[in-house]
Image (tube, coloured by chain):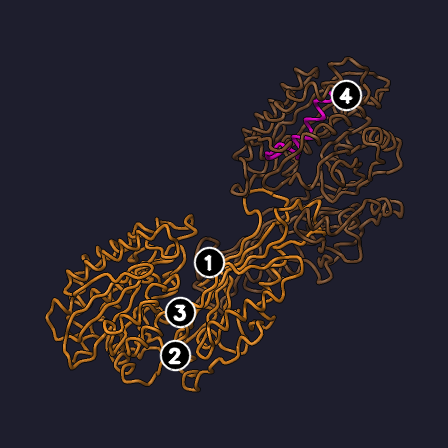
Chain colours: A brown, B orange
């Protein structure tokens, strides 16, 4: 199918696509929260049925945790086999009070659909599937298409990762298509050339056996909230670099070509500030923002809690303090070693008299760096140039899709990451949304790229 | 009445006293939480009725906030007038999950009564009132007794403090008796010679307009949780002293006699650690623990919160971070100036690009330091020695009863602070309790001290 055919197919079917999208978004498939296990299972069943009625052989693969949706549609044996990866789980919706419309009641306003997962990843996976369904209905020549949709991308991908090796034959492919990345700016075609890996931990500092009266004990008993704050503050040096000893050991620097391609993407600090509300002032000052997020590791506290946070005053020295921490790692870093380095550093700086406990710890997944000059990337650049008229940007992304390096390895395929997400979509935050225009662009790209691969 | 009479009066009436105590504890009179305003009002009415039926003229004085219970019973015009101060409000009961029995269902176990307020202050105020009632019933010669019970001691005493001047005539007295302090160790008679003042504030550091994806933005966008941690960590120097510039300016040092009396109270770091769970390692190393809590200011974070603290991972850079902070101040420090000094220091250290907001701020009350050699203190020492056989300890207390300096000034009276609370009571914490033995000791002291003052 050519560009005009695909665009008109979208416009004829857009009502049905949006209805599907809304149905998919109504499942509160929050993988981090065990109370939503059943919602995740229901969401997986819905997708498997949708794929069946759309021309695929589909099934649910049970794992130790959430089910994985697998589907296949045989195509030309002489063309490359395409494996599409997506995830049907979503981030928690907290803080709930900040949502203008309820997170699991999809609502269209001013051409955008608002819901948790509207973009990440239900919006991007659905335009991909709708494009496949359009090609199947049109009976055009196609590659063999395989689809794998997991339910734990947002919380560690344990289920899929422990089963990958046994699914080697199902997954075997030449191209691994992923639509879970962003465009460098609204509507600008973008191919993602790298992802950071991610590790996570939760730590608790324990002091007194119970909260102490801050009058009687203030200036005598140690305060875990103070000491945890000192530990958190100590994770970074004043110059913005990570203070954990040895953390940068082994970091693979970008090639000169990678660095110049990464810096070719226009970056305006004022635009960044107007889009996010903050200037791009964190991290190492000797690197550009694109280099910092693309080629350098980062550590962030995602949550911290101690003592009384209700209304009014409660004059206590809290008994304990807890922080949830994640770090993004880059090629050349060993995720397990990084995790151990953080734990060791924190533990070494705990003052005598307080007890340090690691309550959760996971080396979720490693980093990925791709070849910007491969034939597959050249094809994708051509397709994107045909759609938009612009040469696509190549992006070394700061975010992670931790399972991708493993899926690529087991399936023997080359990853191709093209997505149309943007900052305005507020992925992971309240009032997540995705525009119908973005959805349409993703649909057109997927249909044309699959046509190109089958030609 | 003499010691034997009073003790036998307690033993004859203890069932009734405990029934009264339980009734008083069933009111969840949490002053910090506006949802409990009605419970506070009901608790005040119950006390006013109890005082009426016990021989006092009682009434509720309305304030801008919670009502104040006032009661009077005329006695000898040639003896000193005694004003008793107590508070019927309690601290919040959070964290609720840590209570073994519900906080507002008083439960006796192994000779201790468990409930929020069992000690602070409902237990100690009630043994005082029961002792007065016993003396009134016994028709022995008495001083004029006045009782003032406020409902906001745990949350700033706004109601009473704004009305004190207009109640000057009601309150006029010679001795201000307070039973809201502790014994230096279980059963050891103790007279409190000083209290620290208290100030409080809540601050929020705001970053991005909403939570940001920690992958895309990690190492680029500033993290308010990191920066608030740095601010909190910066409140103290590595030597344990307060880092806020000028904070110690004006601090009145103790006299040599005060210092040696304060240090005469036995203090064993190992006993402290076994009682609280932590070694006494906070604060300035150049002062003893008794000096640190009695004569030196302290700053404590009572609560800190940012980002996601639920189950699992949520990979965000939080949009904001909040800390609730209180400081204990000592004679010679101006509470308002201390508050401003903390705010100024925090504000000056906020990194560019983040917004600092003070969301709450109160100079709750100043400090108090009494004369250890006054005739009133000598009388109390004699009474306590008669009860226990031991010379009482003199304690310069780290905690605050912020309204006491003002009540003492307006009433023209000399404060006398004797209480029997202990660390094992867990005031302000889950599973607060007070033993029937402590209650009895307080009752006996109050009855004998009032007899002494009337003799």
Separation of disc 3 and disc 1 at Cα? 23 Å
- Circles 3, 1 touching at the beta carbon (< 8 Å): no
Asked if the magenta segment contains residue B280, the reply would be no
The residue pinned by badge 1 equals A209
Few, some or many residues within 10 Å of mark 1 (<14, 14–19, 20+): some
Q: Secondary structure at mark 3?
A: loop
- Circles 2, 4 touching at the beta carbon (< 8 Å): no
Few, some or many residues within 10 Å of mark 4 (<14, 14–19, 20+): many
Does label 2 lie on the same chain as label 3? yes
**In this rendering, which labeled residue sits more in front, label 4 or label 3?**
4
Asked if the magenta segment contains residue A114, the reply would be yes
Q: Which of the two residues, A451 or A145, is positioned nearer the viewer here?
A: A451
Horizontally, residue A266 falls left or right of residue B44, namely right
Q: Quadrant of residue A435?
A: top right
Q: Which of the two residues, A113 or A451, is positioned nearer the viewer here?
A: A113
Horizontally, residue A5 falls left or right of residue B376, namely right
The residue pinned by badge 4 equals A6
Query: Which residue is farthest front?
Result: A110
Q: Which residues are magenta?
A: A112-132
**In this rendering, which labeled residue sits more in front, label 4 or label 1?**
4
Q: Secondary structure at mark 4?
A: helix
Q: Earlier in the sequence, mark 3 or mark 2?
A: 2
Separation of disc 3 and disc 2 at Cα? 11 Å
Separation of disc 4 and disc 1 at Cα? 66 Å
Report the residue at 30% width, 49% height from top.
B105
């Amino acid at each position: 199918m050519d560009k005009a055919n695909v665009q008109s197919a979208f416009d004829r079917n857009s009502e049905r696509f949006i209805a599907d999208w809304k149905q998919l978004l109504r499942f509160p498939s929050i993988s981090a929260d065990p109370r939503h296990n059943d919602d995740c299972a229901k969401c997986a069943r819905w997708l498997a049925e949708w794929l069946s009625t759309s021309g695929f052989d589909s099934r649910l693969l049970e794992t130790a945790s959430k089910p994985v949706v697998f589907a296949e549609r045989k195509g030309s044996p002489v063309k490359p086999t395409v494996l599409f990866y997506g995830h049907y789980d979503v981030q928690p919706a907290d803080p709930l009070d900040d949502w203008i419309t309820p997170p699991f009641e999809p609502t269209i306003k001013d051409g955008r659909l608002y819901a948790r997962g509207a973009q990440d990843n239900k919006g991007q996976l659905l335009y991909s599937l709708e494009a496949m369904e359009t090609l199947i209905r049109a009976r055009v020549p196609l590659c063999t298409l395989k689809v794998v949709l997991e339910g734990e991308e947002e919380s560690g991908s344990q289920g899929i990762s422990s089963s990958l090796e046994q699914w080697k034959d199902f997954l075997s492919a030449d191209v691994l298509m992923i639509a879970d990345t962003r465009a460098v700016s609204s509507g600008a075609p973008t191919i993602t050339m790298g992802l950071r890996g991610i590790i996570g931990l939760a730590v608790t500092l324990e002091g007194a056996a119970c909260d102490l009266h801050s009058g009687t004990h203030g200036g005598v008993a140690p305060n875990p909230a103070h000491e945890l704050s000192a530990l958190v503050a100590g994770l970074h040096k004043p110059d913005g670099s990570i203070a954990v000893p040895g953390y940068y050991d082994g970091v693979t620097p970008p090639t000169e070509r990678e660095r110049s391609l990464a810096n070719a993407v226009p970056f305006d600090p004022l635009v960044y500030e107007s889009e996010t509300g903050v200037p791009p002032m964190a991290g190492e000052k000797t690197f550009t923002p694109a280099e910092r997020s693309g080629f350098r590791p980062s550590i962030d506290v995602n949550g911290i809690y101690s003592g009384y946070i209700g209304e009014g005053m409660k004059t206590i020295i809290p008994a304990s303090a807890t922080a949830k921490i994640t770090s993004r790692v880059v090629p050349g870093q060993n995720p397990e070693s990084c995790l151990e380095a953080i734990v060791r550093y924190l533990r070494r700086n705990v003052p005598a008299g307080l007890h340090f406990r690691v309550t959760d710890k996971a080396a979720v997944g490693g980093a990925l760096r791709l070849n910007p000059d491969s034939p597959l990337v050249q094809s994708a650049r051509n397709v994107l140039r045909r759609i938009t008229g612009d040469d696509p940007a190549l992006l070394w992304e700061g975010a992670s899709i931790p399972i991708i390096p493993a899926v690529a390895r087991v399936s023997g395929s080359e990853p191709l990451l093209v997505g149309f997400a943007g900052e305005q979509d507020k992925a992971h935050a309240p009032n997540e949304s995705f525009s119908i225009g973005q959805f349409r662009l993703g649909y057109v790209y997927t249909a044309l790229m699959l046509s190109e691969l089958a030609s």
